[in-house]
Image: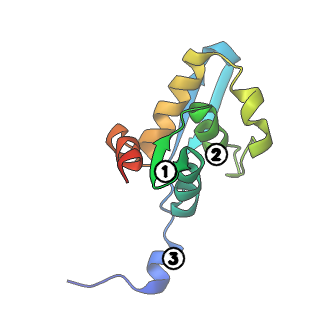
Amino acid sequence: MAYLTRDQILQAQDLPVEDVEVREWGGVVRVRGLTGAERDAFEASIVRRKGNKAELDPTNMRAKLVAMCVVDEQGNRVFSDKDVELLGRKSAAALDRVFQVAQRLSGLRAEDLEELEKN
């Protein structure tokens, strides 16, 4: 068995993308899975600390993930963090459809979100 080298790992194109039709928005968006650093930032943004306890804060959770994962043809984010509040005002059904794809592509399972709250 041959093990991957550092360069092979760092050069691997490992971020999955998927196009999602969003009828409510009148077209298709490209969704990219999160990088490791982006996932950590997303998880940190939905956890609130109260003393020694952590609580899951679902405020605009779908909009936050969608903003981080919707990209253009070159792979650049379409939305900035400043757009999250505005994006959160869009159709819940549309956001949820894109959120579910972003969640799957990023390896975020419902159990992971529950685990965040426990830890």
Q: Percent position (x, y) of residue 113?
A: 41, 42
Local crowd size for mark 3, using a 10 Å CA cut-off: few (<14), some (14–19), many (≥20): few
Which residue does the image show at 32% across and 41% down from the upper left? Answer: 111
Tell me which label, 1 or 3, sits earlier in the chain.
3
Disc number lying in front (3 or 2): 2
The one of 9 and 35 positioned closer to us in this rendering:
35
Q: Earlier in the sequence, mark 3 or mark 2?
A: 3
Q: Earlier in the sequence, mark 1 or mark 2?
A: 1
In front: 38, or 31?
38
On the rendered structure, is 108 left or right of 29?
left
- Residue 17, image x, y percentages: 53, 46
Q: Amino acid at mark 1?
A: Pro
Circle 2 is placed at which residue position? Answer: 68
Q: Are marks 1 and 3 in contact (CB under 8 Å)?
A: no
**Is residue 44 rendered to the left or right of residue 86?**
left
Mark 2 residue type: Met
Q: Give the residue type at disc 3.
A: Leu
Kindly identify which residue carries mark 3: 10
Q: Is residue 100 left or right of residue 38?
A: left
Q: Is 5 in front, or is 82?
A: 82
Question: As displayed, is residue 29 above or below residue 107?
Answer: above
- Whether 103 is drawn above or below 95: the answer is below
User: Crowdedness of circle 2 by 10 Å Cα count: few (<14), some, many (20+)?
Assistant: many
